[in-house]
C-alpha cells in the first residue's frame, strides 16, 4: 500500500479541507482496492505558505496539493481568466467551465506538467468594506487589499489605493486598524477569516473569482499500479470540479445567511443600471488581460461561452 | 521503518548532534532531511534544503526580525540607553535603592524600543553599572538589577523572541505584543518589590542617591525625547493602524538611523560595526529558522506530534498539571540547552498539545517568553549573567548569581501568576480587538 | 604568510564586505518602506509594489549575511560538552561541528542551483510589479555557494588546528543577540 500525502494550507476544520478534500481522500483510498492510502496533511503541516504549495508537489514533498495560481504569477496564467470581473457567476459554473477549457486544450504550459485532479474557481468576489460603497465612484480614495495582478488595473481605474502584502488571515486585523478600507471577497471567506466582525458594508457585484487547482505530481501518478490510477481518475476531472463548485456555492450561501443576519450592516446588490456602471468601470482589467495573455481573446471567449451554459451568466 | 520509531531516533540524533556543539539550525536541518528521506525519498527531502530556506528568506513576517535587530543596534549607538537612564534617575534616583530601581525602569523603557535582551543588558552594563558601583552599591545588587533588567528587553514589546514565536506558530505578532503589556508591567513591579525587600533586609546594599534640584530634573526629562519619539512612533503607529508591524520596524530603523546621525554618533566606523553586528545576528536566527521548519516537516510526516498529543490526552490529568509538567520540562531542558533552543526544538510537539488542551497560543507564547527570560539568568547558560561577567572581568560569576536570587524569586512568582490567571495576558488583546 | 592563509584572509574579508553590502540593502529597504507609508498616509498615494521589492530584496539581504556569519562562527549552539572534554576531545568536537555545518551549507548550495534554475525556466514573477524573480534568486544562490566555499576553508582551518593539536582557532567575539 502506497501512502499519498495530500497537503492543504487550511486548518483541518476549514470548510474545503474538512468537507471536500478529506472525503475525497477517503473515497479514493476506498476505491483503490487497498493499493493506495491518501493521507491529509492539513493546517500547513507540509508547507505553510499558500504560495509554496505548487513547489511542494513539484518536488514530491507532497504528492497532491491544493494550489491557488494567483499566488504564483507567471504560472498557470491562462487560468487567471477566472479572476476577470463580470465572467464567473458561481463556483459551480466557474469550476465546470475551467475544466472544459482544460479538456479543450486551451490551458497549456504548467497545466501539462501535473496530473490535474480538479480545476476550480471560487464564488465571485464582491466589495466588502468598512466605508459605504455603492457606486464605482465611491471606491475613489479608499485603500483596498491588492488582490493580485489581474485586478490591479481595475482598482487603479476606480481610484482606489491598492495595499499589497495582506494575506487572508490578516485581512480582518488590517481592516479593523484602518490599514485597508476594504477587500474583494465572498461570504465564505468573510466567515472563515472573521472579516464579518469588522466589515459594515457589502456591495454584491461580480468582480472576479479566485482560481484554484488540486494537482498531483505526475511522476508519482505514473508510478502507481493501474488499480490506483483508476481510483484517482474516477474521482478527478469534470465530476470533481462540479462537486467542488457545488459544495463551494452551498457554503457561500450558508455563510451569507449567517453573515447577513448581523446587526448594523448594509448589504446592497448591484443591479440594472448600477451593474452596467460597474461593468464599464472595471472593464479595463479584461482588456489588459486579453492584451497581455497569449491566446487571450480565444481563452476569454471560450470561457464565457462555457459559463453561459449555467444559470445567471452575464 | 515504523515512522514513530524513526521520529524517536530522529529526536535522539538531534540531541546528540547538539551536545556535540553542532549549531542548532544545522542539527535540526540535517536530522530533518535524513528522516524525511526515509519516508518520502531523497529527492523530495533534499529539495527542502532550498525551498524552505527560500520561503523563510522571502517571508516579510520574518523580515521584521532583522529590522528590529538593526533598529536596536542603531538605538544603542545613538545613545538612547543613556538618555532613558538619566530621565529615570532624575525622577526616582533619590529614593532608597533608587539606582537599582532606576536601572529596572530604564531597562523597561529601553526595552520599548529594543527587541533584544542581550542588547539591553549590554547597554546598561555600560551605562548603569558604573554609576551604582561608584555610589557604593553592593556589586551583587548592582549586577543583579542589570541582568534582571536586561530580560525586560524581551518581556517589553517589541520583542525578538515574541516575533520568533509568532513566526514559528503562525500567531499574530501584534496580538503577542498587546498581550505582553500587563505581564511586562507586573515584571517591573515585582522587580522593584524584590529590590525593596532586599534593601529592607540589607539596607547597606543600596544607599540613597542625591536628590536633583527641580530645574535639573526638568532638563533631564527633556533628554528623553529621542526614546519617546521612537517608542511612540513605533508602538503608536502599530496600534493606531497607520502601519503594519513590518512597516513599523522599517520606520523605527529610519528614525533610529536619523537620530544617531543627528547626534553625530554614527561615523563610518560605528556604522559598519552596527551593520556587521545586526547582519551576523540575523544570519544566526535565519539559520535556526531554516532548521526548525525542515525538522517540523519530518516530525509531521512521522505523526510523532499526534502521538505526543494522544498520549498526553490518555494520561487523563487536569490541563493545568500538563502545563505544570511542560514548565518543569523547560526548566530541565534549560539545564542542558539555552531556553531559546529549548523552545524552538519543542514547539512542533508542544503546540499541538497546548491547542488540544484548549489553551490560547498567544498566552503560551507569553509564558514561553517569560521562561526564556528566566533562563537568561539561570545556570548553566544564563546568557545575561555570562555577558555581564564577560564585560566586567573583575566581578565574580558567583557574585552575579547571588545578586540574581531576589529577582529570580520575583520571576517565579510572576510565572506562577501568569500561568494560573491567563486573563492577565489575554484581557488586553481581547478588549483591543 | 602561506598561500592558504592569504586565500583565507581574502575570502573572509570578502564575506564581511558582502554582509555589509547586504545590510545596507536592508537599510535602503527600510527607507523605501517608510516613504511608502508616508506617501500612503499623507497623500493616499502609495509607492507601487514595495512589498514586491521587499520580498525579493530580502532574499538577497539574508543570503548575503550567511558567509560572514560562518566566518565568525556565530551560531546558536550548546557548548557544554566541550568544556568537560580534554584538549583533544574539544578539538575533535570543533572539527565535527564544523564538518556538519559544511554538509548543511553544501546541501543548501547544491539544492539552490536547481531551485533558482527552475524560477528562470517557469518565469515566475512578483505580485504587483510583475518583475521576473529569477535574477534575485540567482544572486542569492551565488551567496549560498560562496558561503559553502567559505565554510570549506573554515573546516580546513579547524582540521589544521586539530592536527597541530595546539591551540583552538581564536574565537571571534562570540555572543548571542536575542
Ligand atoms: Na523589547
Ligand atoms: Na539558563
Image (tube, rainbow, N blue to C red):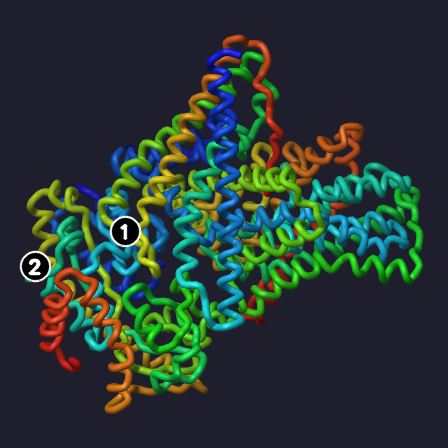
The label nearer to you, 1 versus 2, is 1
Label number found at residue C124: 1
Instruction: For mark 1, give the secondary structure.
Output: loop
Ligand 2 quarter of the rendering: top right
Quadrant in which the C terminus of chain A is drawn: bottom left
Q: How many marks?
A: 2
* Residue A29, x across and y down, in percent: 17, 51
Residue B255 visible to an observer of this rendering: yes
Image location (x, y in percent) of residue B265: 70, 45
Residue extending farthest to the bottom is: A273
Q: Check the image and report above or below for B316 versus A185.
A: above
| Residue C53 position by quadrant | bottom left
Q: Residues within 10 Å of mark 2 (few under 14, many from 20)?
A: few
Front-most of A39 and B84?
B84
Q: Picture coordinates of residue A281 (x, y %)? A: 29, 80
Please indicate whether residue B122 sits to the left or right of residue A191 in the image.
right
* Along the viewing direction, whichever of C129 and B232 lies nearer the viewer: C129
Q: Quickly name the residue at label 2.
A: A105
Of residues B319 and A246, which is closer to you in this image? A246
Subunit of label 2? A
Place residue B217 in its image quadrant: bottom right
Amino acid at each position: 500500500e502506497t501512502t499519498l500525502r495530500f497537503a492543504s494550507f487550511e486548518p483541518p476544520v476549514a470548510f474545503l479541507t474538512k468537507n471536500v478534500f478529506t472525503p475525497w481522500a477517503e473515497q479514493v483510498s476506498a476505491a483503490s482496492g487497498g493499493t493506495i492510502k491518501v493521507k491529509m496533511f492539513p493546517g500547513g503541516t507540509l508547507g505553510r505558505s499558500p504560495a509554496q504549495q505548487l513547489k511542494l508537489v513539484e518536488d514530491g514533498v507532497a504528492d497532491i496539493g491544493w494550489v491557488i495560481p494567483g499566488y504564483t504569477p507567471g504560472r498557470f496564467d491562462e487560468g487567471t481568466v477566472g479572476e476577470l470581473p463580470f465572467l464567473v457567476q458561481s463556483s459551480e459554473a466557474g469550476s465546470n467551465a475551467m475544466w472544459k477549457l482544460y479538456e479543450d486544450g486551451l490551458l497549456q504550459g504548467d497545466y501539462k506538467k501535473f496530473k490535474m485532479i480538479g480545476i476550480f474557481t471560487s464564488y465571485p468576489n464582491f466589495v466588502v468594506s468598512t466605508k459605504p460603497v455603492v457606486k464605482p465612484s465611491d471606491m475613489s480614495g479608499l485603500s483596498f487589499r491588492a488582490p493580485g495582478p489581474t485586478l490591479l488595473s481595475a482598482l487603479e481605474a476606480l481610484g482606489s489605493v491598492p495595499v499589497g502584502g495582506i494575506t487572508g488571515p490578516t485581512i480582518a486585523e488590517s481592516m479593523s486598524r484602518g490599514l485597508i478600507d476594504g477587500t474583494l471577497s465572498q461570504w465564505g471567506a468573510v466567515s472563515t477569516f472573521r472579516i464579518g466582525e469588522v466589515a459594515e458594508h457589502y456591495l454584491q457585484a461580480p468582480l472576479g473569482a479566485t482560481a484554484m487547482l488540486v494537482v498531483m505530481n505526475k511522476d508519482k501518478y505514473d508510478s502507481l499500479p493501474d488499480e490506483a490510477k483508476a481510483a484517482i481518475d474516477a474521482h478527478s476531472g469534470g465530476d470533481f470540479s462540479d462537486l467542488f463548485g457545488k459544495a463551494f456555492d452551498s457554503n457561500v450561501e450558508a455563510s451569507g445567511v449567517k453573515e447577513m443576519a448581523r446587526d448594523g450592516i448594509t448589504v446592497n446588490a448591484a443591479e440594472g443600471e448600477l451593474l452596467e456602471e460597474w461593468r464599464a468601470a472595471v472593464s479595463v482589467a479584461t482588456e489588459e488581460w486579453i492584451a497581455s495573455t497569449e491566446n487571450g481573446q480565444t481563452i476569454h471567449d471560450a470561457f464565457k461561452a462555457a459559463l453561459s451554459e449555467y444559470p445567471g451568466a452575464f | 521503518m515504523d515512522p514513530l520509531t524513526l521520529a524517536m531516533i530522529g529526536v535522539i540524533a538531534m540531541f546528540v548532534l547538539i551536545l556535540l556543539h553542532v549549531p542548532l539550525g544545522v542539527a535540526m536541518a540535517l536530522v530533518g532531511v535524513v528522516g524525511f528521506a526515509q519516508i518520502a525519498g531523497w529527492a523530495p527531502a533534499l529539495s527542502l534544503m532550498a525551498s524552505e530556506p527560500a520561503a523563510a528568506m522571502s517571508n516579510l513576517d520574518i523580515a521584521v526580525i532583522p529590522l528590529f535587530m538593526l533598529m536596536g543596534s542603531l538605538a544603542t549607538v545613538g545613545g538612547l540607553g543613556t538618555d532613558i537612564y538619566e530621565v529615570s534617575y532624575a525622577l526616582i534616583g533619590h529614593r532608597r535603592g533608587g539606582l537599582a530601581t532606576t536601572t529596572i525602569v530604564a531597562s523597561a523603557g529601553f526595552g520599548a524600543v529594543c527587541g533584544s535582551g542581550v542588547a539591553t543588558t549590554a547597554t546598561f552594563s555600560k551605562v548603569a553599572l558604573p554609576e551604582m558601583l561608584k555610589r557604593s552599591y553592593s556589586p551583587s545588587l548592582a549586577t543583579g538589577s542589570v541582568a534582571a533588567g536586561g530580560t525586560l528587553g524581551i518581556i517589553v514589546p517589541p520583542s525578538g523572541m515574541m516575533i520568533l514565536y509568532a513566526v514559528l506558530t503562525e500567531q499574530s505578532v501584534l496580538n503577542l505584543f498587546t498581550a505582553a503589556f500587563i505581564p511586562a508591567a507586573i515584571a517591573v513591579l515585582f522587580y522593584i518589590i524584590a529590590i525593596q525587600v532586599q534593601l529592607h533586609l540589607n539596607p547597606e546594599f543600596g544607599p540613597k542617591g542625591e536628590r536633583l534640584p527641580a530645574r535639573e530634573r526638568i532638563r533631564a526629562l527633556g533628554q528623553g525625547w529621542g526614546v519617546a519619539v521612537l517608542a511612540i512612533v513605533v508602538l503608536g503607529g502599530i496600534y493606531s493602524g497607520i502601519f503594519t508591524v513590518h512597516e513599523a520596524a522599517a520606520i523605527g530603523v529610519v528614525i533610529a538611523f536619523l537620530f544617531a546621525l543627528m547626534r553625530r554618533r554614527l561615523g563610518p566606523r560605528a556604522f559598519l560595526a552596527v551593520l556587521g553586528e545586526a547582519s551576523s545576528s540575523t544570519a544566526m536566527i535565519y539559520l535556526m529558522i531554516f532548521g526548525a521548519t525542515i525538522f517540523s516537516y519530518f516530525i509531521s510526516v512521522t505523526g510523532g506530534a499526534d502521538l505526543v498529543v494522544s498520549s498526553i490526552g490518555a494520561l487523563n490529568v487536569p490541563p493545568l498539571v500538563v502545563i505544570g509538567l511542560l514548565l518543569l520540562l523547560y526548566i530541565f531542558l534549560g539545564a542542558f540547552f539555552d531556553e531559546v533552543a529549548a523552545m524552538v526544538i519543542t514547539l512542533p510537539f508542544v503546540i499541538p498539545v497546548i491547542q488540544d488542551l484548549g489553551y490560547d497560543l498567544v498566552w503560551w507564547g507569553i509564558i514561553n517568553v517569560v521562561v526564556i527570560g528566566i533562563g537568561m539568568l539561570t545556570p548553566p547558560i544564563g546568557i545575561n549573567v555570562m555577558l555581564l561577567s564577560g564585560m566586567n572581568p573583575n566581578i565574580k560569576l558567583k557574585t552575579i548569581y547571588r545578586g540574581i536570587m531576589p529577582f529570580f524569586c520575583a520571576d517565579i512568582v510572576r510565572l506562577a501568576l501568569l500561568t494560573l490567571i491567563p486573563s492577565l495576558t489575554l484581557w488586553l488583546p481581547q478588549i483591543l480587538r | 604568510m602561506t598561500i592558504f592563509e592569504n586565500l583565507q584572509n581574502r575570502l573572509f574579508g570578502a564575506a564581511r564586505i558582502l554582509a555589509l553590502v547586504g545590510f545596507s540593502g536592508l537599510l535602503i529597504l527600510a527607507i523605501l518602506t517608510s516613504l511608502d507609508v508616508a506617501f500612503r498616509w499623507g497623500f493616499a498615494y502609495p509607492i507601487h509594489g514595495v512589498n514586491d521589492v521587499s520580498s525579493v530584496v530580502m532574499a538577497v539581504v539574508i543570503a548575503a549575511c550567511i558567509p560572514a556569519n560562518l566566518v565568525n562562527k556565530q551560531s546558536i549552539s550548546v557548548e557544554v560538552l566541550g568544556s568537560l572534554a580534554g584538549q583533544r576531545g574539544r578539538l575533535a568536537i570543533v572539527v565535527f561541528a564544523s564538518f556538519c555545518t559544511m554538509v548543511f551549507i553544501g546541501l543548501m548550495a547544491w539544492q539552490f542551483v536547481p531551485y533558482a534554475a527552475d524560477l528562470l525556466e517557469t518565469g515566475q514573477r512578483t505580485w504587483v510589479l510583475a518583475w521576473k524573480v529569477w535574477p534575485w534568486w540567482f544572486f542569492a544562490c551565488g551567496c549560498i555557494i560562496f558561503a559553502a566555499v567559505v565554510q570549506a576553508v573554515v573546516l580546513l582551518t579547524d582540521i589544521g588546528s586539530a592536527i597541530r593539536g595546539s591551540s583552538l582557532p581564536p574565537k571571534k567575539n562570540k555572543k548571542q543577540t536575542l
